[in-house]
Image: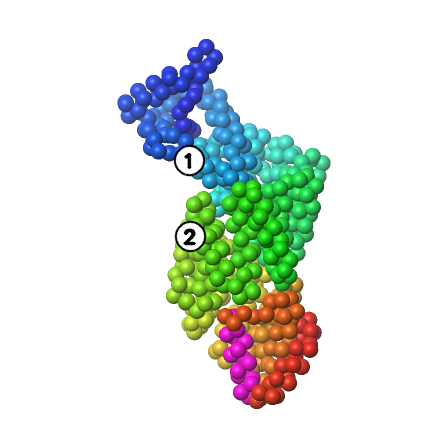
Amino acid sequence: MHPRRGGGGLRRGGRRAPDAVLDVLARLVDRSLVVAGSPDDADGPRYRLLESVAAYGREQLAAAGELDTAQARHQAHHTALAERAEPHLYGPDQRRWLLRLDAESANLRAALDGALARGAGEGALRLVNAMSWYWYLRGRHREAHRALGGALAVGGPPAAVARAGAWQAAFAMLVGDGSDLLRASRAAVAGYDGVDAPRQRARAEWFLAHAHLNFGDVPAGDELSATALAAFRTVDDGWGIAAALSSRAKVAMFRGELAAAEHAAADSRRRFVELGDRWGRLLADDMLAHHAEVTGDHATAARLHREDLRIAEDLQLWTDASYRLSGLGRIALLTRDFAAGTELHERALRLATDQGNPFAAEYARVGLGLGARRQGDLDAAEEHLGAALTRNRALQADYGVAYYGVTLLLAELGFVAELRGDAARATALHGEALAAARGVGEPRAVALAVEGLAGAAAVAGHHVRAARLLGAASAGREAVGAALPPAERGDVDRIAATARAALGAAAYAEAFTEGAATRLEDV
């Protein structure tokens, strides 16, 4: 066990005796048996036993036959603390309670270890269920995965098992551990059958949707988030409605439905701001920043990322901070500030690596690959992007889903091949990207793959085909309101210039117009 904060324990006449506690603490500190923390801590000074003294105390408790009782009381106290803290992690007191749980981490871990060792399944499940949102916010996904697995192995009441099972299925996705995770998600939700907990079930469905969307599994994220949103509205869960709206915005963004994405994200942000949940604001702002980036409003995207980076740093949400740094890095690339783009992505990678978050780390590495290609360093680009593609394909195979991340990586590697003059490899990569983009139903990704095929055609000398493909891609983007902003036209302008030089302006324009009359799905 780890000693908790002073302030209770000794009693006189059945009542707490604060003065007596302070007197004992003062004497123990004077004798160097207890170490006093800083009086400037948010909740006052903390007191810590020296390890040798703690070990001696455990020996004496064991010798007196009181160790189990003391450990059970320790577990009960810290379980109650975690359960008291949990609702505050969803609102304006988020920062204070995150720091409080940070300070108690060793005690909470010891309480869980003790419960598992004693086979106290109900207590262990109560503790992990109360702690899971804290672990998620703090980026401690692997710790959560292990702890939930241990508690589920002991077992307990059906409602607690259902809730822990849903958390565990989501964290399995977030750490990249598992297979056939759509089936696992459905099994986790089905665990609530027969359990009267509609609000908890809705939150489980939302968190599973959030995890699926984290790596681009749009169909599962769509299904689960839609069900969760309807359930949240039924039980009037304001936080849940705001969270599910952000997920609906992400689904819409993946599918190229930009107006719907912006509307849902703005609604989500408004609700989270009213609730005082700053993490929720980060969630909604991420979609608003992405919308601004896609529509060419780089100043707004950068402003949102900067504001949210300050929030993430204040809350010490380092995984979120990593994503915001990468977001700023992407904007730097689009505005051709390549030095800043590299520096921001490297900072993001260091944070993600320190947090042990593979998805945030990969997002930063992909950014480094994007920057390398745009600066002409094709070897470095291929190294970064190829490693990411290998991992993404493994995820796709393990999880049994069409993974959105594959489409961008295939397209980027296709452009690398095109720039090297390898028409056959470029055609193969962009063709695979086109199939993957159609699999996830993302029109902008489809257009990107078609633009890549145009580049491959131009390298192979098929200039009429290149012009037609560019026309089809342009019309497809305009159909969903996502015309390429000037900063993202580099590849298209290069390919168009090659085809126009070979055909002449008039013939190029004619072929481009013919292509624009072709539906993207018919390419």
Q: Residue at x 47, y 44 (%)?
A: 138
Q: Residue at x 59, y 53 (%)?
A: 265
Question: Taking the image as drawn, is residue 490 in sight?
Answer: yes
Q: Residue at x 30, y 24 (%)?
A: 29
Amino acid carrying mark 1 in the image: Ala
Structural crowding at the residue carrying mark 2, measured as other residues with C-alpha within 10 Å and reported as few (<14), some (14–19) or many (≥20): many
* Image location of residue 522, percent across then percent down: 69, 74
Above/below status of 177 relative to 118: below
Question: Taking the image as drawn, is residue 400 in sight?
Answer: no
Is 491 one of the magenta-colored residues?
yes
- The colour scheme used to paint the residues is rainbow
Above/below status of 388 relative to 66: below
Quarter location, residue 255: bottom right
Q: Which mark is residue 103?
A: 1
| Residue at numbered disc 2 | 351
Structural crowding at the residue carrying mark 1, measured as other residues with C-alpha within 10 Å and reported as few (<14), some (14–19) or many (≥20): some
* Image location of residue 455, percent across then percent down: 55, 78
* Lateral position of residue 45 relative to residue 196, left or right: left
Question: What secondary structure is found at the residue carrying circle 2?
Answer: helix
* Lateral position of residue 159 relative to residue 315, left or right: right
Question: What secondary structure is found at the residue carrying circle 1?
Answer: helix
* In the foreground, 364 or 2: 364
User: As drawn, which residue projects farthest toward the top?
Assistant: 13
Q: Which residues are magenta?
A: 488-502
* Image location of residue 142, percent across then percent down: 50, 45
Quarter location, residue 8: top left
Mark toward the start of the polypeptide (1 vs 2): 1
* In the foreground, 85 or 196: 85
